[in-house]
Image: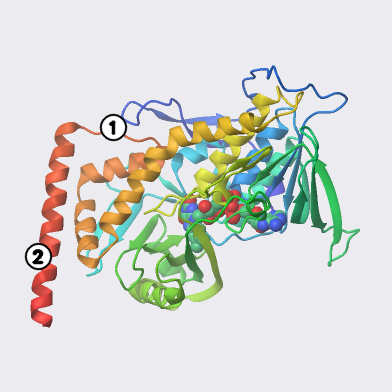
Amino acid sequence: MASSMAFKPFTGLRQSTLTTPETTTTTPITFTKLPSSKTAIRAAITSPKLTGRNLRVAVIGGGPAGGSAAETLAKNGIETFLIERKLDNCKPCGGAIPLCMVGEFDLPLDIIDRRVTKMKMISPSNVAVDIGRTLKPHEYIGMVRREVLDEYLRERAAGFGATVINGLFLKMDLPEGKDGSYKLHYTGYDAKSGGAGERRMLEVDAVIGADGANSRVAKAIGAGDYEYAIAFQERIKIPDAKMQYYEDLAEMYVGDDVSPDFYGWVFPKCDHVAVGTGTVTHKSDIKKFQLATRTRAMDKIQGGKIIRVEAHPIPEHPRPKRVLDRVALVGDAAGYVTKCSGEGIYFAAKSGRMCAEAIVEGSANGKRMVDESDLRKYLEKWDKKYWPTYKVLDILQKVFYRSNPAREAFVEMCADEYVQKMTFDSYLYKTVVPGNPLDDLKLAVRTVGSLVRAYGLRREMEKIEA
Ligand SMILES: Cc1cc2nc3c(=O)[nH]c(=O)nc-3n(C[C@H](O)[C@H](O)[C@H](O)COP(=O)(O)OP(=O)(O)OC[C@H]3O[C@@H](n4cnc5c(N)ncnc54)[C@H](O)[C@@H]3O)c2cc1C
């Protein structure tokens, strides 16, 4: 279906500068064609020049990380192969994306199912706080179905010249010698191979592992493991009258019942809602938490029909190793999901693009061989840009998701307009937003107040129960 939507003129919202959101103007821009801007080139002086061919790079995995990496490589002179095992893959995912992704990745609005402008945060005792009040008229959280987004990005990469291969990557032989090639073994599926597929081999100079949480590329380079959450989701088709309630609204539920360390969600899609939850600490109880999430939302989803049940791991932190020689990991394969929000789509697309840019730059647009130092530049940039974001969300999760009183305090705090503005600006634009010192101080006092009240309440409850 995405083939019909690729390369169509569209109107998107693009953040016009990289300044803080307070000074940023977000203006509607009419696109008539996709930008073909080339990545700035710094000629690599030491690496050998390639003769008679350009640099060949394989991207394993065609999710947002792989699609974005392949597009950047292909439009900047690299011979690009994108290997995806399932071209109609429906990645289990809530599909919430920040506004800045729409602009930065030139996403056509017709691949976005819903524009959420209202978010309800619902506490363990079912106190609901509306947290979209500070959004400006053009701001929203995008809700996508992954089968639509991923296909769109892959086809766009193909439009720039990437060869998309329907294949299951199996293993790779490491290069012999400094500039030797990687031999990738995969099962290819096409008209010639039939349904069972056919063992094939591809030789490349560098590999980007964008093959998600169970990455075989990570295994192949001994990248090490990470802790992970298991997330469960049901797509539920609810009656039209009930769907109206979720037209531009999403819900987040917190409480021991829905998850001991994460949150439950109801996210609206084109004609259904996605209801899910996740946990790191109590994985075997995930179905119990899912039932609780559904029960909490029951009055709004009653009469609904479950049309799809899906589950998948979510990485908790980066792998010990993300680059080795001429192989780099991006997206979930690298472990780039934020704590607290469980957000990974934007970071996957962004890391895919940044890694590809490092290869383009290091190879002088595919004219030279790359080495590990070229790929490491992507890691340096990445860690510098996003480490604070990951750290802040890690701390927030530790403070506010650890008990029901802390969650009550969290939801109480979310009623504060300053908190909402800071949270939304950081989420929508992926910038660490500098606060106003006086408001920060007031917020700190209110936070402590909320936590003290919540713990006082817990003590009283314990006395009553004793
Ligand atoms: C239930 C759930 C809800 C979530 N909700 C959100 C949300 O609302 N917002 C958000 O931002 N993030 C969310 N996330 C996280 C988000 O889904 C991931 O961070 C994101 O998909 C990472 O993208 P990726 O391209 O790195 O990997 P993936 O999306 O996992 O893509 C990997 C691709 O590689 C392919 N592949 C895997 N192995 C092979 C192989 N051997 N050979 C060939 N191809 C292979 C797969 O088929 C897949 O297409 C959620 C995750 C889960 C599990």
From the viewer's perspective, tell me whether residue 463 is left or right of residue 39: left
Depth order, front residue of 178/131 = 178
Q: How many marks do you count on the picture?
A: 2
Callout 1: SS: loop
Q: Name which residue lies at 56% across and 37% down.
A: 105
Task: Tell me which label, 2 or 1, sits earlier in the chain.
Answer: 1
Look at mark 1 in the image and give the residue it sits on. Answer: 434
Callout 2: SS: helix
Q: As displayed, is residue 340 above or below residue 174?
A: below
Is residue 138 visible in the rendered image? The answer is no
Would you call the spot at circle 2 few (<14 residues within 10 Å), some (14-19), or many (20 or more)? few
Q: Quadrant of ligand 1?
A: bottom right
Rendered image quadrant of residue 69: top right
Look at mark 2 in the image and give the residue it sits on. Answer: 456
The amino acid marked with disc number 1 is Pro
Disc 2/disc 1 C-alpha distance (Å): 32 Å
The amino acid marked with disc number 2 is Gly
State the image coordinates of residue 299 (x, y, percent, origin top left). Answer: 34, 75
Query: Residue placed farthest to the front in the image?
Result: 177
State the image coordinates of residue 319 (x, y, percent, origin top left). Answer: 53, 49
Q: Name which residue lies at 28% across and 41% down.
A: 421
Query: Residue placed farthest to the right in the image?
Result: 192
Q: As displayed, is residue 49 above or below residue 126?
A: above
From the viewer's perspective, tell me whether residue 151 is left or right of residue 378: right
From the viewer's perspective, tell me whether residue 252 is left or right of residue 166: left
Depth order, front residue of 34/315 = 315
